[in-house]
Amino acid sequence: MRDHFEIRDHDAAGRIGRLSVPSAGVTVETPALLPVVNPNVLTIEPRRLREEFGAEMLITNSYIIRSTDRIRDRVLEEGLHDFLGFDGAIMTDSGSFQLAEYGDIDVTTAEILDFQRRIGSDVATPVDVPTPPDVDRERAERELETTKQALADAETADTGEMLVNAPVQGSTFPELRKAAGRHASGTDLDVFPVGAMVPMLNAYRYADVVEQVRAAKRGLAPDAPVHLFGAGHPMMFALAVAAGCDLFDSAAYALMARDGRYLTVSGTEHLAEMTYFPCSCPVCAEHTPEAVREHDDDETERLLAEHNLHVTFEEIRRVKAAIRSGNLLELVDRRARGHPAMLDGYRALLDHADELERTDPVSKDAFFYTSHEAARRPEVRRHHDRLSRLAVPDRLLLTESNAPSSHDYDAVWRVKPPFGPFPRALSETYPLTAEVPDRVDDAAQAAAADGVASLADAAPEAAITLGHDDWCAEALRRVPDGIAVENLQTLGQ
Ligand code: GUN
Ligand code: ZN
């Protein structure tokens, strides 16, 4: 891996980074959304993508350019930037997608990389094999070997200043994805797209998407820039960024518009069925759905594509702002309420809370407990791990209520679901400043009980008493036997 990527901020496994693209003379801030530009159909002029929508980078397909007589020579002559009228960075794909769709293409990695360099691409792609999900392991392994060979061919090709993608394949086998990630990281290539995710994305298999991304990330270097190939629905950006993705490309804005579909951050609507626009982008501010429908088909499609792109970039900015404020997981939680498949994705992400914890900042804006999923967040995990480092007094009262005015314990600590116990002196430190609802749920109580268990584990000699506020049976079951337990509500009666 060459060093073109700098990470500025973290939240969970998400980050704000800067990818420097030397041949374009630009630095692209990530998370970044690359609009897919069909070189034959410019639904929205690339110049406008940059000026009106803020696209710093776009992606187009070098294989289509190479196989279209009408434009090939013009692009070779003018160069891609002038041909498209775009002075940001341009990534080009290789024809692998066509390979996956039609089974055969007539170009090698060496040939297509040479073509990409000659048309002036800034980030090129070798001919990887996008192995679909759920194939048998032999096929996934065999095709991964072909992809590895493509990366080797890319390493020896004369690519000049151009950056080169090293796609990570492996179908739905996490071990293969991890091995592919490690191998790709070991090459001198530059950007690391997780590939063949389109079938999973189209089927809303967000838990599988998270599993494969996390597996690839386990093999990749922590500071490798990661592209989620083919992911362009704004609904899933927060989730994918929190899992560690930095780049996205959207064909969805244009493809959906062609089908009369209107993107939102919580799903897709049909223009035909809409009475109101829930958006304030220039298109939605100036039109009613009825007015958009009354235009001719091309104009309706263009207006829809513009709205789709506005919500898409808006969500990318919202994700970046969330990383800066340290509330990316609150945003993922909100998006998870938009669709049950997103909730599966969020739950799959939280299965890897220990991995997310490694890059999660120790201090951020207040932790908001807004759903029982939050009981599994990395901050809770970290608090439990840290309990083992605290000096525990011999006779200790842990209580959810105020300290009693007189007692004969050596110390009285607070208990706050979902974190569990901590010395009162830590009350004002992150994440214990968390905003938690008064009506605590079972998951938060159970997580607090796990915290009590961690403490008891770390101090087996201590005599610990727990005063809890009517915890559920599951939480009480998780409190170790040696701890004296009192229900504060019963005591109060
Ligand atoms: N576009 C969407 N998925 C893929 C992939 O796996 N490889 C390439 N090269 N392009 C893609
Ligand atoms: Zn809009």
Image (tube, helix red, strand yellow):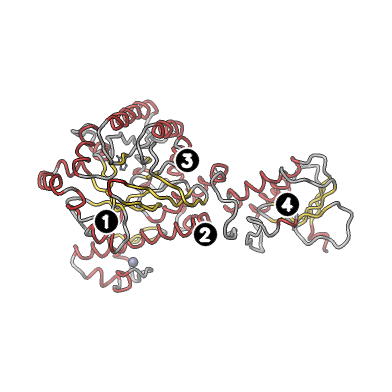
With respect to residue 139, does 40 lie above or below?
Answer: below
Please name which of the two marks, 4 or 2, marks the residue nearer to the observer: 2
Q: CA distance from mark 4 to mark 2?
A: 26 Å
Task: Report whether 406 appears left or right of 177.
Answer: right
Question: Secondary structure beneath disc 3?
Answer: loop
Q: Quadrant of the C terminus?
A: bottom right
Where disc 2 sits, the SS reads helix
On residue 222, which mark appears? 3
For badge 4, the amino acid type reads Pro
| Disc 4 crowd, CA 10 A, few/some/many (<14, 14-19, 20+) | many
From mark 1 to mark 4, how far is it between C-alphas? 52 Å
**How many labels, in total?**
4
Residue that numbered label 1 is attached to? 254
Q: Where is residue 461 shown, x and y percent of the image?
A: 82, 40
The image position of residue 330, as x and y in percent, is: 53, 57
Q: CA distance from mark 2 to mark 1?
A: 32 Å
Of mark 3 and mark 1, the one earlier in the sequence is 3
Q: Which residue is mark 4?
A: 421
Q: Which residue is mark 2?
A: 325
